Image: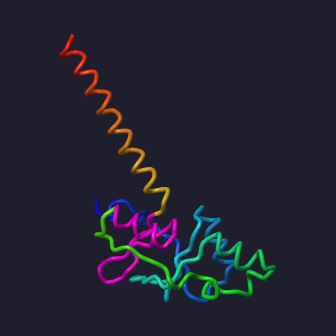
Amino acid sequence: MPVGELCTRQTVVAPRGTSVQNAAKLMRRYHVGDVIVTDQAKADLKPVGIVTDRDIVLEVLAQGLDPSGISVDDIMNQDFAVAQEQDGLFETMEKMRSKGVRRLPIVSANGVLVGIVTIDDLIELLAEELGALAKLISREQKRELELRS
């Protein structure tokens, strides 16, 4: 399955220059743990970084800095990974594992933001798949009992 089929298409974005305080307000309003930073706030958004709730805590609050005076540019992870929407799930999971990230922006072939996938999304999908396999085993055992009785 391509990751583009699983990703959440509605992402929370903030243009460069957005204050950390405003980014935190966006996270609260939309109940998310990240904001994808873009060069502009219009169509054809291309991600240039990502800021997570953890970034805000560790880089700003823990250091006693004023979140209204710091922009997302100052704390965003610029060496962040993205996945292409046609990438497979296991390829995407490997990319997340190798980069040590829980969230991965998903982009089109020309680098335009199309969504985001999180570790929670992947765990939910894998749990459903494992549940289906467990049902298969149970049905197989039941069928065998019926045939052999």
Q: Which residues are magenta?
A: 90-117
Left or right, 26 with respect to 59, comes to left
Magenta stretch: residue 7 in it?
A: no
Left or right, 66 with respect to 15, comes to right
Question: Image point 33% across, 32% down: which residue?
Answer: 135
The C terminus: image quadrant: top left
Where does the image place residue 10, in percent across and percent down from the top left? 45, 67
The N terminus: image quadrant: bottom left
Q: Is residue 136 above or below residue 70?
A: above
Question: Image point 48% across, 62% down: which residue?
Answer: 118
Where does the image place residue 66, in percent across and percent down from the top left? 78, 82
Where does the image place residue 24, in percent across and percent down from the top left? 66, 72
The quadrant where residue 6 appears: bottom left
The one nearer the camera, 35 or 99, is: 99
Magenta stretch: residue 99 in it?
A: yes
Q: Is residue 109 above or below residue 141?
A: below
The quadrant where residue 127 appears: top left
Where does the image place residue 96, in percent across and percent down from the top left? 45, 68
Count of numbered badges drawn on the protein = 0
Question: Image point 48% across, 73% down: which residue?
Answer: 99
